[in-house]
Image (cartoon, rainbow, N blue to C red):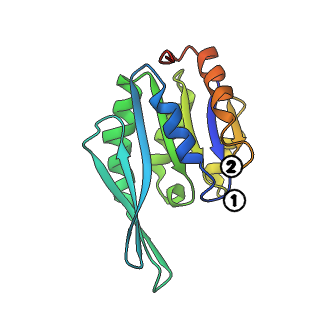
Amino acid sequence: MKKIFFTGERGVGKSTLLKKIIKNVDCSIGGFIQEKEFIGETKKFKVNSLYNLEESYTIGVYDADKHELHSDMNMFNVISQDVLLKSLDNRELIVLDELGFMEEKAPLFKDTVFKILNSGKPVIGVLKECDGNFVQKIARREDVQVFKIDESNRDSMEDEIFKILQKNNVKLKKKL
């Protein structure tokens, strides 16, 4: 079972592609989507649960004035328990959007991600382009296929990803 991840430069459309694909999947979806919220010079990093669409978690805050990123490692533990493990037990497809450097210091979260990757469940997600051990360990797995997304291929990748998902027995919505 192939696990699919996108990588590429910031702002190239990785998460947008992921959201397009999710909209066309016809099975239960768990995991999370990450989004950024801008408030003046402050950027909040939020995780929105796909297991329970009403749940959202702030995992970090970047203060541009001070050039400081404050990550909430405890929130990664909560996400591991309340989103990822429940998704693993109760959903057919797991989404892991924007795995990167913030997770390096969250051992329970990392262990949970590897538990998901070691399961027979299909996984689709986004890996930040970074040198962190966590991201590199995921990218080097034999069961992981990483697609580098850029402006020239982001629109054509959708069909290729759908073919891989179908080979992994993920049901897709019928196109009209």
Q: Quadrant of residue 169?
A: top right
Rendered image: mark on residue 136: 2
Looking at the image, which residue is at 64% across and 58% down?
132
Looking at the image, which residue is at 34% across and 31% down?
86
**Amino acid tagged 1:** Asp
**Amino acid tagged 2:** Gln
- Drawn side of residue 106 relative to residue 140, left or right: left
Q: Which residue is mark 1?
A: 131
- Give coordinates of residue 16: x percent, y percent: 53, 45
- Drawn side of residue 110 relative to residue 5, left or right: left
Q: Are marks 2 and 1 in contact (CB under 8 Å)?
A: yes
- Give coordinates of residue 174: x percent, y percent: 49, 15
Element assignment for label 1: loop
Q: Quadrant of the N terminus?
A: top right
- Drawn side of residue 71 relative to residue 169, left or right: left
- Give coordinates of residue 130: x percent, y percent: 66, 59
